[in-house]
Amino acid sequence: MTTAKTIPATRNEAWGFWGTMDAHPQAAWPIAMNAISDATGQPFEAVRAFLDSRHGRHFADEVLNRMHAGHALHDAIRAATRQWMEWTIGRRTSKDYGIPRGLPYLTGFVIHCEIVEEEVAA
């Protein structure tokens, strides 16, 4: 018997992924949470921290660009997730954020955002 995990709600309706998704945040949120968690292997809490951050806003921009190009919401999120997983952390980003060089961009920033959120809460 499997137990479904509850997707946490955004803590940033005005900005981040939610605030950038125009008329689509309620539909996009669970799709993005699942796609990013599946791709990165990170828990929903880490993904929520990423989506609520400025990096989540940039991710939403990529999703919206794909939707404006004719992709359906689900396909746009999956394509953006794949793209962010194909990009890798370079020297400059590694130096600026402390994320290991060569890590997939999406994985690196999901983990980074979770760490920053934990530091702020401490």
Image (cartoon, rainbow, N blue to C red):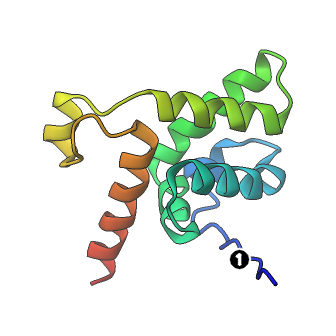
Between 103 and 68, which is closer to the camera in this rendering?
103
Above or below, 33 against 89 in this view is: below
Measuring from the top left, give residue 74's x and y in whole percent.
Answer: 81, 39
- Which residue is located at x 67 percent, y 71 percent? 9
- Which residue is located at x 82 percent, y 23 percent? 71
Residue occupying the far left of the picture: 95
Residue 70 seen:
yes
Q: Amino acid at mark 1?
A: Lys
Q: Secondary structure at mark 1?
A: loop
Q: Residues within 10 Å of mark 1 (few under 14, many from 20)?
A: few
Measuring from the top left, give residue 44's x and y in whole percent.
Answer: 58, 67
Is 42 displayed left or right of 122 in the figure?
right
Above or below, 3 against 101 in this view is: below
Above or below, 38 against 20 in this view is: below
Image quadrant containing the C terminus:
bottom left
Residue 61 seen:
no
Which image quadrant for residue 78?
Answer: top right
Is 119 displayed left or right of 52 in the figure?
left
Residue occupied by mark 1? 5
- Which residue is located at x 82 percent, y 44 percent? 23
Is 41 displayed left or right of 64 in the figure?
left
